[in-house]
Image (cartoon, rainbow, N blue to C red):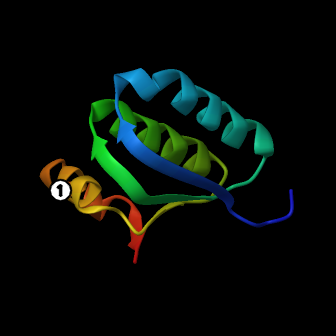
Amino acid sequence: MDGQDYEIALSGEVDIAFGDELRTLGEAFAQSGRSGAVVDLAGVTFMDSTGLNFLIGLRRVARERGGSVTLRRPSPACRRLLQVSAFDHVFDVSD
């Protein structure tokens, strides 16, 4: 563990069809041993509950390790989902 956050970049439509890739990304973060993650959402054109559940899962792992998840540059579609679900107050969001 080097103390740096684990970096993930998502793009396109993050929905049920993206589920296998999200599982792989989540497992890679869990196995990395890092306590925090930064998820770049600038390229996301659509996100549904599948993507939101992925982010929540990352947060759970990070919190168990004393870390956090930062959402970097969320696209308008992501911002809207985060606001409607009130998760914009749960995650650290940076532009």
Provide the secondary structure element on which disc 1 rests: helix
Residue at image location 67% in from the left, 50% down from the top: 65
Instruction: From this view, report whether residue 78 is shown above or below residue 25.
Output: below
Decide: is 33 above or below 57: below
Q: Position of residue 43 (x, y in %)?
A: 41, 56
Amino acid under disc 1: Arg
User: Looking at the image, how many numbered discs can be counted on the residues?
Assistant: 1
| Image spot of residue 85 (x, y percent) | 18, 47
| Left or right for 31, reference 82 | right
Q: Residue furthest right?
A: 1
| Residue sticking out furthest to the bottom | 95
Q: Which quarter of the image is occupied by the N terminus?
A: bottom right
Q: Compared to 72, does 84 lie above or below?
A: above
Front residue of 45 and 95? 45
Judging depth in this view, the residue of 6 and 18 nearest the camera is: 18
Residue 28 image point, x, y percent: 71, 37
Q: Residue at coordinates 45% horizontally, 28% vertically from top-left?
A: 18
Residue occupying the far left of the picture: 84
Towards the viewer: 21 or 28: 21
Identify the residue under disc 1: 80
* Classed neighbour count for the residue bearing mark 1: other residues with Cα under 10 Å, few (<14), some (14–19), many (≥20): some
| Point 55% across, 53% down: residue | 9
Identify the residue at horizontal 45%, vertical 48% (top origin).
11
Q: Which quarter of the figure has residue 56?
A: top left
**Residue 35 shown left or right of residue 49 in the figure:** right
In the rendered image, which quarter is residue 54 located in? top left
